[in-house]
Image: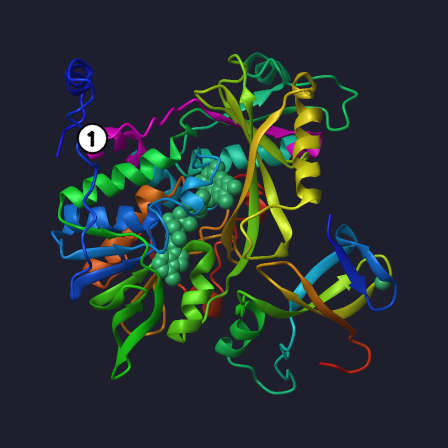
Amino acid sequence: MTRYSAFAVFREGLRRQKGWKPAWRSPKPKKAYDVVIIGGGGHGLATAFYLAKNHGIRNVAVLEKGWLGGGNTGRNTTAIRSNYFYPESAALYDFSVKLYEGLSRALNYNVMFSQRGMIVLAHSEHDMEMATRQYNAMRLNGVDAVLMGRDAVRRLVPVLDMSLDARFPIHGGVFQPRAGTGRHDAVAWGYARAADRLGVDLIQNCAVQGFVMEAGRCVGVQTSRGEIGAGIVGAAVAGHSSVLAQMGGYHLPIQSYVLQAFVSEPLKPILDTVVLAPALGTYVSQSDKGGLVIGGGLDRVPAYGQRGNMPMQETVLGGLCEMMPALARVKLLRHWGGIVDVTPDSSPILGRSGVDGIYLNCGWGTGGFKAIPAGGYLFAHLLATGQHHDISRPFDLSRFASGALVDESAASGIAH
Amino acid sequence: MQVFPCPYCGPRNETEFRYIAAAGKTRPDTTQPVQDQDWARYLYRQRNEKGAVREVWMHLTCGELFVMERDSVTMEVLGSTALRDGVE
Ligand SMILES: Cc1cc2nc3c(=O)[nH]c(=O)nc-3n(C[C@H](O)[C@H](O)[C@H](O)COP(=O)(O)OP(=O)(O)OC[C@H]3O[C@@H](n4cnc5c(N)ncnc54)[C@H](O)[C@@H]3O)c2cc1C
Ligand SMILES: [Zn+2]
């Protein structure tokens, strides 16, 4: 396989781009694998990569019902951050940001992680107090943070409406300098290519339709491409986690909802950071192509249809126009929805499913893109050793019965 | 904009409604000691079906709870029944 480098780009330029090879193979499924991972999103692909890389387990298949990265990984607004409230979450998401910092090199694939920072605005004196609390929590958790007043915010994001008679005037905010954006497809493709290179079979158009059980233990999966044996199975199917749970006979505290996003026509550079206005229900960044990448909160109706609805569009886009009135006449280019897996405490689930041989990586809901490297790393650890890594232990499914929830819903609001 | 049917008020804008829970959950009998697992099941476990669902919804405008049957993929509404009449 071609190693990607500036030199390779130059050489292929001279050869009329004829020398590029496919980035990964398209193998036929084998009869059985040591580990079968269901779901070829970022989490499934990263898990396969770290199984091979960190644990030397290479007899691994990733089964994807559609195409690699075609789920939420290819539909998200790519905000990467670790500005969480609780130490458990900070440990998890900051580990992920650290892995992102070295990811392009580790994968030999440019994931375009751009640490342009992210600001969460505060719209009242009370918001400002909560922002200070958030800032303190982040610093205590060892995460970088800057508390900003009005002037600093104005300098950071000149396009904001800073007038004091705005419906939600801006008092300040909390800024995380190491936060930023990445290229979602590149994260999926980079992990896919690196996993393939280590011997992992990536099998697309292969839907898992049932589990093969033997004496109470899962020993394989039934798929649209036949039965495939498995030493153990890891499920990383996001919004479809409950569908698999019904096939496997285990139970999840997950509800699936649509989350929408929007991209505008390309503009000249106007915004060089990620801005979230909690009171307006909108966040926005600008992609390298110039499009504004816009998101908001969940649609309010539980759903599996990958499309949006009007009330949330109105909230999000109305919020954008209030936040940055100069953008009111900008045209939208695309708009879409993804099915996200929401847990009661807005924290993910990593751990055993309750059925022998089936493990879970799910519940990332609206915010699991930033967590792909850590989710893959920790899930690989779990699958390889049967034991939790210290960072993943608090996120076990058993927390719902013990009551030890990691309740980030209040602390992180709509921020993805 | 989707229209949902309230059994009391008729067809109304979806923003007037709030999803409450999947239908058919029974609160544990608190006159007896309740196991953690049973509380957890009641509080957190979701059926979250893809396809036909039966759910309890509230019409915020009139404040009534009712059971709505929907398809969670097509979003088609299949029926709505008042809860008062002792459905659940
Ligand atoms: C609009 C939107 C905006 C978002 N914004 C952000 C953001 O800014 N920052 C952030 O951190 N997160 C964000 N998220 C969340 C993030 O996208 C997800 O948490 C993350 O991508 C989940 O990755 P995954 O690999 O678990 O799931 P996915 O990428 O959804 O992958 C799961 C895969 O499983 C496959 N699958 C399902 N069922 C089966 C089956 N039976 N057999 C085989 N394969 C199956 C699916 O086809 C899919 O490809 C956003 C999500 C959406 C929808
Ligand atoms: Zn009514």
Ligand 1 closer than 8 Å to label 1 CB: no
Give percent across and percent down for residue A367. Answer: 47, 44
Residue toward you, A27 or A286: A27
User: What amino acid is found at the position of numbered circle 1 in the picture?
Assistant: Asn
Q: Is residue A74 magenta?
A: no
Residue A46 to residue A267: above or below:
below
Q: State which quadrant residue A96 falls in.
A: top left
Residue at image location 51% in from the left, 57% down from the top:
A343
Residue A338 to residue B59: above or below:
above
Count of picture labels: 1
Q: Which residue is mark 1?
A: A108
Relative placement, left or right, of A403 versus B15 is: left
Q: Is residue A395 visible?
A: no
Q: Is residue A129 visible?
A: yes
Q: Quadrant of ligand 2?
A: bottom right
Relative placement, left or right, of A39 versus A275 is: left
Residue A86 to residue A385: above or below:
above
Relative placement, left or right, of A324 versus A49 is: right
Give percent across and percent down for residue B8. Answer: 87, 67
Q: Which residues are magenta?
A: A99-127
Q: Is residue A111 magenta?
A: yes
Give percent across and percent down for residue A239. Answer: 47, 56
Is the residue marked by circle 1 packed among few (<14), some (14-19), or many (20+) residues within 10 Å?
Answer: some
Tell me the colour scheme of the image.
rainbow
Q: Chain of mark 1?
A: A
Give percent across and percent down for residue A37. Answer: 28, 58
Residue at image location 20% in from the left, 30% down from the top:
A108
Relative placement, left or right, of B75 versus A238 is: right
Secondary element at image label 1: loop
